[in-house]
Amino acid sequence: MPQSKIAGTGFYVPQNAVSNNDLTKYMDTSDEWIQERTGIKERRYAHRTNETTTTMAVEASKIAIERAGITPQDIDFIVFATLSPDYYFPGCGVLLQRAMQMKEIGALDIRNQCSGFVYALSVADQFIKTGMYKNILVVGSEKHSFGLDFSTRGRNVSVIFGDGAGAVVLQPTTKEGQGILSTHLHSDGESAEILAMYNPGTHANHWLPQKLADFDEAEIGEMFFSHDMIDKAQVFPNMDGPAVFKKAVVKFPEVIMEALTANNLTPADITVLIPHQANLRIAEFVQKKLGLSNEQVYNNIQKYGNTTAASVPIALCEAWEAGKIKEGDLVCLAAFGSGFTWASALVRW
Ligand code: COA
C-alpha cells in the first residue's frame, strides 16, 4: 500500500498588514494587551472586494502544484478546509476547481475550523493509500476580516484572526518510511457553542449562551438573519477565550503524544512541530510540556494572527521555505479549535 507524501507546498497572504495599533482606531484595545495575551503583532486582511477565500486559495495552490511538478489539470481531487467560504453554499472546492480550470474532479469541503487542514490532510491520505487518487490538492483558506465585530464588544475575538491561505499536494510514495506516518482525529461537541458563529444556522435557541439567546419565540424559524441577531452579535464569532485556552493546552500535547506513541517515537524525535497558530502562549505551553527546544517548534502567529484552517499549511510552507524541513525530517502537525475538534499528523519528509 502506498503512503502519501507532501510533494509541494504553497501559501499566500494578502499584502495589507494591519498592526495592533491600527485596531485601536476601531476598538478599545492596545498593542501591549494583544502582544502579551496572544503574541500577535500584526495580521493580514484581504482586499474587501477583490480577494476572497477562493482567490487566496488559488494563489497558494498554484505554488504548491508547481512545486509538486504537475499542472492543475493533473489534480484528481480537492479537499478544501475553511470556515469562511465565499458562499454559504456551494463550498469553495468547486470554486477552486473552476478558477483553476481543473478537470471535472471531486471537490470536498471540510468544516472543522482550526483543525480543518489536518482533518483534510487525513481524508486525502486515505484516498492516496487506497490508490484511488494520485494528486490531491489539500487547501486551508480563510477570509476572516469580512465578518468580525470590530467594535469593543468583539475585541476578544477580532484581534486574534487574520486572512490567508495554504495548500499542499499529496502524492503516493513507495519509499520505505517516507510520507504521512499517521493521522489522529478527535472531537467533543459538549462545548460546541463556546467558540462558534451561530448564524446563518438552523439551530434552536436553547443551545445558545443565555446572554445571546434572548429571542421572541415567534421569530424562531421564520428568518435566517434579522436585525435582532445583529444587535445581539449572533452574526459574529463568539468565544469564551479562557475556556478555549484551558482545553487547548490539554488536547494539543495529548494528540501529539498519541501520534508519537503510535509510531514508537518521542518528542525528541520531532524535527519540527507545526502547531495551529491559535495563540503564542498556547504554543509555548505545549512546547514546554513536551520538552521541545525553540528549534523544534515553528510559530508565525506574530505576523499573521490566527488564520484558522490556513494556519498549519502557511506555517508548514514557511518553515519549508526557510530550510527548516528537509528530506528525512520528522514533522508533526497539530491543531485544536472550535467544535471542539483536534487532530495531529506525523510526516516523515
Ligand atoms: N483588548 C483589551 N482588553 C481585552 C481585549 C482586547 N482585545 N479582549 C478582552 N479584553 C479584556 C476583557 O474584557 C477582560 O476585561 P475585564 O477583566 O475588565 O473583564 C480582560 O481583558 C481579560 O479577559 P480574558 O478573556 O480573561 O483574557 P485572557 O487572558 O483569557 O485572554 C484571549 C483572552 C482570547 C487572548 C485568551 O483567552 C485566548 O487566547 N484564548 C484562546 C483563544 C483561542 O486560541 N482561540 C482560537 C481557538 S483555535
Image (cartoon, rainbow, N blue to C red):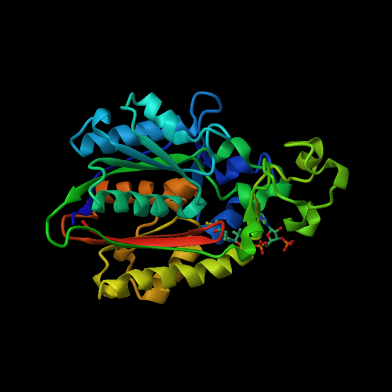
Task: Compare residues 174 and 151 and report the one nearer the observer.
Answer: 174
Q: Is residue 87 left or right of residue 236?
A: left
Work out whether 272 lies above or below 153. below
Picture quarter with the C terminus: bottom left
Task: Compare residues 321 and 234 and report the one nearer the observer.
Answer: 234
Picture quarter with the N terminus: bottom left
Q: Residue furthest left?
A: 175
Is residue 148 visible in the rendered image? The answer is yes
Q: Residue at x 33, y 23 (%)?
A: 101
Q: Is residue 25 left or right of residue 37?
A: right
Q: Residue at x 50, y 23 (%)?
A: 50
Residue 77: x and y in percent read 32, 38
Q: How many marks?
A: 0
Q: Is residue 332 left or right of residue 217?
A: left
Q: Residue at x 50, y 45 (%)?
A: 42
Residue 143: x and y in percent read 52, 38
Work out whether 173 lies above or below 165. below
Residue 223: x and y in percent read 77, 36
Residue 45: x and y in percent read 52, 36
Is residue 216 visible in the rendered image? The answer is no
Q: Is residue 132 left or right of residue 58?
A: left
Residue 34, quarter of the rendered image: bottom right
Q: Quadrant of ligand 1?
A: bottom right
Q: Residue at x 62, y 51 (%)?
A: 157
